[in-house]
Amino acid sequence: MPARDVWAELQALRRAGNPQPREVVRLARLAGWRHDRTKGDHHIYIKERFWANLSIPQRGLKRKTALRLLNLIEASLVQEEGSNDDNKEG
């Protein structure tokens, strides 16, 4: 289960006007994502057993893109919690 500080940071970045790429990268790493490769100025992050990758531009984020990235990070956390709950039942 992810630590509370990951959830708190996620909510703080959502409330922020427009998070910086380094803030999103920090949150992704806290949530268990790892850097896979760099393509141009985009850093690609992956997480095992999650269906999507994060492509984080390093030259600035538009609000809409930042929210999409935060939604993917949140979805991965929810999925992770669900799989942990499944393991506890069996």
Image (cartoon, helix red, strand yellow):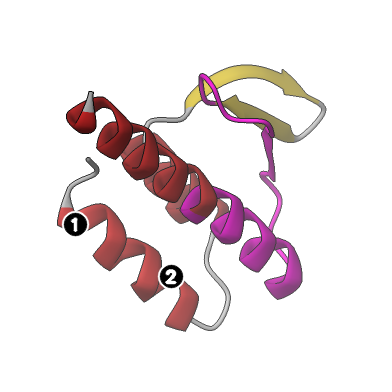
Q: Which residue is mark 1?
A: 5
Q: Earlier in the sequence, mark 2 or mark 1?
A: 1
Nearest the eye: 72 or 87:
87
Left or right: where 73 falls relative to 60: left
Question: Mark 2 is on which residue type?
Answer: Leu
Nearest the eye: 32 or 50:
50
Question: Mark 1 is on which residue type?
Answer: Asp
Q: Quadrant of residue 54?
A: top right
> Residue 38: x, y in percent?
70, 21
Q: Quadrant of residue 5?
A: bottom left
Tell whether label 1 touches label 2 (CB within 8 Å): no
Q: Quadrant of residue 58?
A: top right
Nearest the eye: 52 or 35:
52
Nearest the eye: 60 or 34:
34
Q: Secondary structure at mark 2?
A: helix
Within 10 angstroms of label 1, few (less than 14), some, or many (20 or more) residues? few
Residue at screen point 51% across, 19% down = 48
Q: Is residue 73 magenta?
A: yes
